[in-house]
């Protein structure tokens, strides 16, 4: 997907949102939401090459590839959380957005616990 | 490319706004509200389909 096409899609979406915002704010929110979804779907296919790279060069030499998987999961959670939180902020309810962000942080932390445990085990092994 | 979805939803919004003003000017407030809710439901159906496709793609990609 071309970057110029994505920029044009964003600008057209924002113009439409601005023009219908006063008369019907719900539909303006729907338009901005669908614009974001279309841009994200267009960009998501680009991830494959990056993931191929990561899987090829970071899974060598006894490096535990489970950590890469956890890292990718955390990346996905962060993207989805930010998507939802930004939509709620656009609609003007900042409190719901901050709750969504809190949920994302907690879930990311719970995914990161195994890495922290293995780090602490390594430190313990070195010390004792 | 599904950019026509943006136009579709924006045009539903404009049509609903126009119908809303027309119905309100002729003192049919309940019908105006009905039209708004119907438009909103149509838009929500389109949006939920797109969001679920986005989320399933993200789930496949990041192995969530």
Image: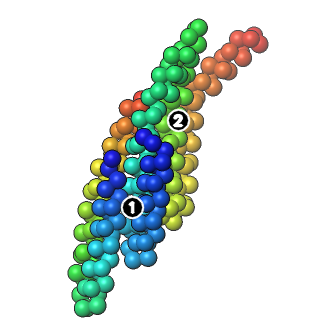
Measuring 58% from the left and 13% from the top, which residue is drawn there?
Answer: A63
Residue B64 visible? The answer is no
User: For the residue labelled by badge 2, is the local secondary structure a helix, a strand or a loop?
Assistant: helix
Farthest-out residue, top: A61
Farthest-out residue, bottom: B26
Q: Which mark is residue A75?
A: 2
Measuring 66% from the left and 20% from the top, which residue is drawn there?
Answer: A119
Question: Relative to the observer, which residue lies in front, A66 or B44?
Answer: B44
* Chain where mark 2 sits: A
Q: How far from the left and from the top, in percent, is residue B42?
A: 25, 62
Quarter holding the N terminus of chain A is: top left
Q: Which mark is residue A93?
A: none
* Chain where mark 1 sits: A
Q: How far from the left and from the top, in percent, is residue A43?
A: 44, 41
Q: Quadrant of residue B61?
A: top left
Same-subunit check for callouts 1 and 2: yes
Q: Which mark is residue A31?
A: 1
Measuring 56% from the left and 55% from the top, which residue is drawn there?
Answer: A98
Q: How far from the left and from the top, in percent, is residue A82?
A: 52, 48
Q: Is residue A38 left or right of residue A55?
A: left
Q: How far from the left and from the top, in percent, is residue A114?
A: 57, 24
**Mark 1 or mark 2, which has the lower sequence index?**
1
Q: Callout 1: few (<14), some (14-19), or many (20+) C-alpha neighbours within 10 Å?
A: many
Q: Quadrant of residue B16?
A: bottom left
Q: Is residue B34 left or right of residue B62?
A: left
Quarter holding the C terminus of chain A is: top right
Q: Callout 2: few (<14), some (14-19), or many (20+) C-alpha neighbours within 10 Å?
A: some
């Amino acid at each position: 997907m071309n970057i110029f096409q994505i920029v044009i899609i964003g600008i057209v979406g924002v113009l439409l949102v601005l023009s219908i915002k006063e008369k019907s704010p719900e539909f303006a929110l729907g338009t901005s939401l669908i614009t974001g979804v279309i841009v994200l779907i267009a960009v998501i296919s680009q991830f494959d090459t990056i993931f191929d790279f990561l899987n090829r060069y970071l899974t060598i030499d006894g490096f535990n590839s489970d950590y890469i998987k956890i890292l990718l999961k955390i990346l996905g959670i962060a993207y989805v959380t930010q998507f939802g939180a930004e939509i709620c902020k656009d609609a003007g309810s900042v409190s719901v957005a901050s709750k969504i962000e809190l949920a994302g942080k907690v879930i990311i932390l719970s995914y990161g616990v195994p890495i922290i445990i293995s780090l602490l085990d390594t430190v313990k092994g070195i010390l004792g | 490319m599904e950019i026509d979805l943006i136009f579709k939803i924006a045009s539903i919004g404009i049509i609903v706004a126009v119908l809303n003003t027309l119905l309100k000017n002729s003192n049919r407030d309940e019908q105006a509200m009905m039209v708004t809710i119907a438009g909103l439901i149509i838009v929500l159906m389109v949006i939920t389909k797109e969001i679920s496709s986005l989320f399933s793609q993200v789930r496949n990609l990041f192995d969530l």
